[in-house]
Image (cartoon, helix red, strand yellow):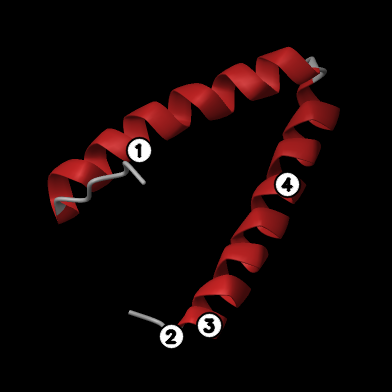
């Protein structure tokens, strides 16, 4: 795993890229803010389940 500084940088890069993808999707599809938020919520639920299963991660803090 990356050290804490690398992890922070990677998270910031991932955030920026995801924000760009969502903005482009919204522009091209005409989706509302709520539709984008709903899509992201659904993706996080599906992706979170897969990550939990694959890596045995406990997301509770």
The mark that comes first in sequence, 4 or 1, is 4
Asked whether disc 2 touches disc 3, contact meaning CB atoms under 8 Å apart, the reply is yes
- Tell me the quadrant of the picture where the N terminus can be found: bottom left
Mark 4 to mark 2: distance in Å? Answer: 24 Å
- Looking at the picture, how far across and down is residue 35, in whole percent? 68, 14
Q: Can you identify the residue that label 3 sits on?
A: 6
User: Upstream in the sequence, badge 3 or badge 1?
Assistant: 3
Alpha carbon of mark 2 to alpha carbon of mark 3: how far? 5 Å
Label 3 Cα crowd, 10 Å radius (few <14 / some 14-19 / many 20+): few
Asked if residue 44 is positioned above or below residue 15 in the image, the reply reads above
Q: Are marks 4 and 1 in contact (CB under 8 Å)?
A: no
Residue that badge 1 annotates: 47
> What residue is shown with label 4?
19
Q: Quadrant of residue 34?
A: top right
* Residue position for label 2: 3
Q: Is residue 60 left or right of residue 20?
A: left
Q: Nearer the viewer, residue 51 or 23?
A: 51
User: Could you tell me how far apart the alpha carbons at marks 2 and 1 are, in whole angstroms?
Assistant: 23 Å
């Amino acid at each position: 795993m990356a050290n804490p500084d690398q992890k922070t940088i990677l998270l910031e890069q991932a955030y920026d890229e995801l924000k760009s993808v969502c903005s482009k999707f919204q522009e091209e599809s005409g989706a509302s803010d709520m539709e984008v938020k709903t899509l992201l919520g659904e993706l996080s639920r599906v992706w979170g389940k897969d990550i939990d299963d694959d890596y045995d991660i406990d997301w509770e803090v």
